[in-house]
């Protein structure tokens, strides 16, 4: 019987939530790596028992953990993520230059075909790759050395490379999202990159339509339609139908278009989900109501999904990597909150239940659909 | 025999129970102790000192004999009581919130 495994990274460890295809009864294991900030936990599409996790902390730095048995046991791997060659400056919050400095791994993206190959997006923004199951890491320096990188600046969370998307049709094509630099695309497997931010408008930078400097929060792609990208930007929900060459705003009737995550229904490429929050200065949902918004039209027309979600006195946020979908029929949608709840919908968002309510603040949610 | 006490996070990461005992040839310095510790437990590489600069991480401190040795040169000789195993060398995670 099919099942799902939900991988949850939190401020104080990781948790693995498992259920059968009904998605009603859940087993909860964890905390794994207790006390560590786990920015991301994810699984290999090529081998669902191969998991990677990125615990880190201000005291003792970065750890990369790997499981070969679906999260039952973990082994620490190599954590030497060293920038290649001399590092130049980027902009600090006040516009002054500051040298690149590694802080942590934000996102791990396993290869679609090889369980031993995994990419890491880090702060300060750079892209790394391991081809030996995370034992050793090499930077793909073409992104950090892009001629615009001296103008990149950190968002509130740091200058992080938080989104990595691998094109399932064209193995040479990949995307990266950097806060606050923008979206980038490589057509040569990560060797060289160019910004793809045409159509983005950000009032927080001197030139609102600059080539770089945009605070991209998250980007999503449906594997059946890889030329279409959806983006939740600092403000604005955006869509590209040409692999990022141009972007159009699709915020439509959203009550606010500030938010962090964006996700796509596994079986309906034009059904997308966001969780709007009040504003850049109020990082919590509006009016004390936790509402997921769904568009079945690829944007612009949105409906609030509230059944089973708190509709009063709720002031949580949902971070950029904390929303994911399974690929069952009906599609399951999952997200975790800054309040430690992980909510699941087994009917594409029509109704919701909390799998757990009292975890540490949730940083990431990924879902594996198991055969 | 040098005795080293690690904080809970690093003991868990390296799967260490209790103190670590290390053979370190004289002169016994912070650098020599940490090099020996990382050689036995490679997973600790980069957790107390920066991978590249080998500087102490900002929130890590080193104590021994009721003294804070964090600001001492890594090549200074440690107290005799550490070198002869009477007192442990303590690796501390700085008190800085939860």
Image (tube, coloured by chain):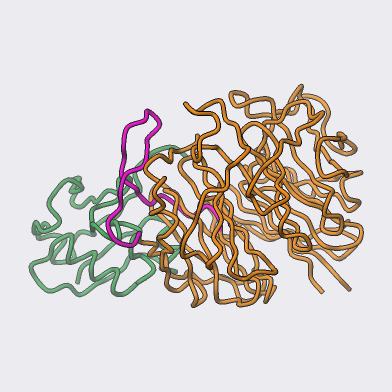
Q: Which chain is green?
A: B
Is A337 in the magenta? no
Q: Is residue A184 above or below residue A248?
A: below
Q: Which residues are magenta?
A: A83-107
Q: Residue at x 40, y 39 (%)?
A: A151
Q: Is residue B72 above or below residue A45?
A: above
* Quarter that holds the N terminus of chain A: bottom right
* Quarter that holds the C terminus of chain A: bottom right
Judge by depth and name the residue closer to the eye, B15 or A44: A44
Judge by depth and name the residue closer to the eye, B55 or A121: A121
Counting from the top left corner in percent of width and height, residue A51 is at 62, 69
Counting from the top left corner in percent of width and height, residue A75 is at 51, 72
Q: Residue at x 11, y 57 (%)?
A: B79
Judge by depth and name the residue closer to the eye, A323 or A154: A154
Counting from the top left corner in percent of width and height, residue A327 is at 82, 62
Please indicate whether residue B74 sits to the left or right of residue A285 in the image. left
Please indicate whether residue A20 sits to the left or right of residue A104 in the image. right
Q: Is residue A27 visible?
A: yes
Indicate the quadrant where residue B90 lies: bottom left
Magenta span dominant secondary structure: loop
Indicate the quadrant where residue A261 lies: top right
Chain A on-screen colour: orange
Counting from the top left corner in percent of width and height, residue A294 is at 84, 41
Is A88 in the magenta? yes
Q: Is residue A56 visible?
A: no
Number of numbered discs: 0
Please indicate whether residue B88 sits to the left or right of residue A169 in the image. left
């Amino acid at each position: 019987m099919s099942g799902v495994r939900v991988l949850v990274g939190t401020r104080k460890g990781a948790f693995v939530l498992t259920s059968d295809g009904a998605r009603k009864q859940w087993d909860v294991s964890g905390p794994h790596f207790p006390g560590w900030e786990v920015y991301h936990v994810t699984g290999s599409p090529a081998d669902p028992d191969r998991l990677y996790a990125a615990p880190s902390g201000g005291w003792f730095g970065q750890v990369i953990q790997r499981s070969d048995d679906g999260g039952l046991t973990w082994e620490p791997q190599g954590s030497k993520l060293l920038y290649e060659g001399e590092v130049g400056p980027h902009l600090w919050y006040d516009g002054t230059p500051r040298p690149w400095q590694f802080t942590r791994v934000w996102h791990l993206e396993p290869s679609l075909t090889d369980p031993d190959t995994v990419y890491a997006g880090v702060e300060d923004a750079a892209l790394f790759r391991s081809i030996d199951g995370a034992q050793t890491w090499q930077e793909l320096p073409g992104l950090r050395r892009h001629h615009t990188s001296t103008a990149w600046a950190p968002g509130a969370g740091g200058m992080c490379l938080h989104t990595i998307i691998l094109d399932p049709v064209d193995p040479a094509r990949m995307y990266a999202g950097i806060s606050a630099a923008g979206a980038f695309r490589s057509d040569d497997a990560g060797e060289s990159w160019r910004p793809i931010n045409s159509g983005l408008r950000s009032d927080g930078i001197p030139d609102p339509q600059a080539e770089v400097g945009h605070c991209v929060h998250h980007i999503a792609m449906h594997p059946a339609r890889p030329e279409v990208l959806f983006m939740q930007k600092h403000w604005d929900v955006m869509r590209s139908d040409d692999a990022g060459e141009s972007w159009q705003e699709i915020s439509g009737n959203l009550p606010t278009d500030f938010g962090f995550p964006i996700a796509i229904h596994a079986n309906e490429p034009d059904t997308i989900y966001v969780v709007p929050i009040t504003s850049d200065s109020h990082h919590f949902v509006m009016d004390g109501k936790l509402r997921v918004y769904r568009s079945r039209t690829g944007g612009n027309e949105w409906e609030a999904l509230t059944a089973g979600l708190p509709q009063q006195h709720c002031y949580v946020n949902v971070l950029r990597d904390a929303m994911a979908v399974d690929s069952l029929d009906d599609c399951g949608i999952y997200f975790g909150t800054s309040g430690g709840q992980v909510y699941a919908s087994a009917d594409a968002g029509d109704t919701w239940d909390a799998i757990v309510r009292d975890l540490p603040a949730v940083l990431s949610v990924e879902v594996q659909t198991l055969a | 025999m040098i005795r080293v006490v690690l904080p809970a996070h690093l003991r868990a990461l390296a799967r260490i129970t209790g103190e670590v005992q290390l053979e370190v040839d004289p002169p016994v310095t912070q650098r020599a102790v940490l090099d020996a510790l990382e050689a036995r437990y490679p997973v600790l590489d980069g957790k107390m000192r920066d991978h590249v600069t080998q500087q102490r991480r900002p929130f890590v401190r080193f104590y021994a004999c009721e003294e804070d040795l964090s600001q001492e040169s890594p090549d200074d000789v440690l107290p005799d009581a550490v070198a002869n195993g009477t007192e442990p060398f303590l690796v501390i995670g700085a008190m800085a919130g939860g």
